[in-house]
Amino acid sequence: MIIAIIDGYTDEPAGLGVPPYLGIYPRYAYGAIKKARKDATIFYLTIDDLRFTFGGEQGIKTKNKTPNVFETRKILKKADLIVYIGGLHTPGKYLSAVPSQVDEVARFMKPFAGVKILGGPAFMGSAHEGGTKICSKELALANQLFDYIAYGDLEAFLYDFLTNPRDADPHRFRTYDELRDYALLGGEVVKQFPDYPDFVIVEIETQRGCPKAVGIGGCSFCTEPLRYRTVQNRPIEDIVKEIEVLYSLGVRHFRIGRQSCIFSYMAKPNGRVPIPNPEALEKLFRSIGNVAPKLKTLHVDNANPAVIANYPEESTQIAKTLIKYGTPGNVVAFGLESADPKVAKLNNLNATAEETYEAVKILNEVGAKRGYNGMPWLLPGINILFGLLGETKKSYEITFQFLKRLLDDGLLVRRINIRQVVIFPGTPLWYMKEKVKIEKHKKLIKHYKYRIRHEIDFPMLQRLVPVGTVLREVRAEVYDNGLTYGRQIGSYPLIVGMPKPVELNRFYDILIVGHGFRSITGIPLPVDINKESSKVLRHLPGIGKKNVIRILSRRPFKSEKEFLDIIEERYRALYRGRITLRQNL
């Protein structure tokens, strides 16, 4: 039996599966198939394999390894079963891989005769962009194209379908006991992932469901409570064993994610704000360190600021655990959404502005120190969502002033993520969608987004990574229009633009030389003063146009001192030990 898994990439509130991230769905699906049918030959393909094979050039830029066009056609033609995984619920901007939509994959899959199954969050539709309602046409197309749609857990349906097809229920959810084997067996699919082995970061599930939603209901826009009505904490032993298997396969980058709040893992229910369990987090991360002693990245994802603000001692202990066993550059995303108390109440949001401020302050006190890779150890990110129920012009100003307060008070925030709400069927907002004024507020949204980027993001980035900072292990990913773009591997890594072509899919140490609104400019080290172009030299701190001319006229330099003598004294320490002087021009 030949089975093809097509990874269309997923992005949802509590999980990411867009390269270089390998999400949970392809791994669990692979493991369920392998457990159900030992005779099955399983092929993992990405949407970029299909784009490259059937869609021409659009697939090339997003592919790290060029796919074999003949093999892709052959696999899909012979496949008895084709499993497509997709779903985009929290649309963002992507660097080297773009999630697919059902209408796109339909063009590719339609000619093939194998049984077609849809899995992942795509059954609820996908968000092409913020500020939209899910289009019923896409859902109708899914029902036409696929023989089965997994409304529950894809891995549960696949196992049932392959062992007892008559009784297979597409609405069934698996238990964590059942998942154990799927997760361990599915680990080997990582070897077929395009970023394997050096650049893949694997998302590890720790919890499903939202503790706050179980206590008092979920946020008005969120799809997480629609799928998972209760909170289930995955056993520590299962998480650690899965990481051990992946580590043995060569994976060195992990994000302990797939949860609404890492500080609520194994927490005690307590209405709106569960009571954290620092001992459980200590045991989890200590055990991960034991089975993966030479890992390179260990990060987390979401956190509820209300939990941190209401339980500062326990949360500080957890933050110290994340620093002790984790790696620098770690970020916990805070879902503030809006600082307007009226909007927060109408949309049943996670935390108040004051709780979020306190949580930001606590994490700064513990995690703002710079780590060995050039980034602070542990910082918050802030999620802002425009277009919610009850918003007025005043709401945007309140949120802006809250963010400005963070800046003015000297606090660090790794990033501010601004999205427009997407209204999904079944969410509370869906039933009140006529009251949402997205269209009416479009100009306001654009205005405040501009102000936040210019007046807050820009100075915050300058504070976060000042000129002269060195970021270690930046992977060069994409070359476009004279610039190379790269980033470190981890949660919400900074995008670095390099004003020169460099070899892709290599790690570089980068000297930060400038700032944008959401990205930075950097030069790979060591800087070859005798060889770099005038374009690159102009970016270097303390050089300027006049010094560029002097450098070009005096090259080749024979010693570091000879070069430093023409640089202002205050910049000389920046270059000591960071330049090279090759003579063979």
Image (spheres, rainbow, N blue to C red):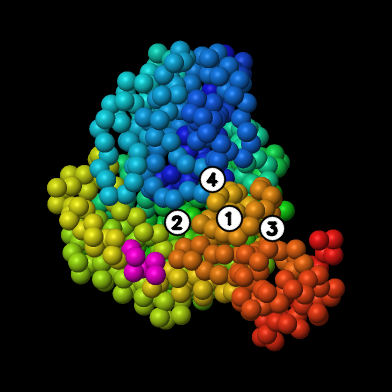
Write down the region rendered in magenta.
449-454
Residue ID for mark 4:
96
Q: Relative to 220, is 250 on the left or the right?
A: right
Callout 2: SS: strand
**Cα gap from disc 3 to disc 1, whole angstroms:** 15 Å
Q: Is residue 461 above or below residue 18?
A: below
Q: Nearer the viewer, residue 193 or 567?
A: 567
Instruction: Please identify, in this view, whether the residue under mark 4 or under mark 1 is nearer the observer.
Output: 1
Q: Name the residue under label 2.
A: 302
Which quadrant of the figure has residue 166? top left
- Marks 4 and 1 sit apart, C-alpha to C-alpha, by 14 Å
- Residue 452 as seen in the image, left or right of residue 135: right
Mark closer to the chain start, 2 or 4: 4
Say whether residue 88 is left or right of residue 277: left
Q: What residue type is labelled 4?
A: Ser
The residue pinned by badge 1 equals 483
Q: Is mark 1 on a helix, strand or loop?
A: strand
First along the sequence among labels 4 and 1: 4
Of labels 2 and 1, earlier in sequence is 2
User: Can you tell which of label 2 and label 4 is closer to the viewer?
Assistant: 4
Disc 1 packing (10 Å; few <14; some 14–19; many ≥20): some
**Which quarter of the rendered picture does the C terminus lie within?**
bottom right
Tell whether position 450 is magenta: yes
Residue 414 part of the magenta segment:
no
Q: Is mark 3 on a helix, strand or loop?
A: strand
Q: Do the residues labelled 2 and 4 touch (CB within 8 Å)?
A: no
Amino acid residing under circle 1: Leu
The x and y percentages for residue 311 are 42, 69
Residue pointed to by mark 3: 508
How far, Cα to Cα, is label 2 from label 3? Answer: 28 Å
* CB within 8 Å, label 2 to label 1: no
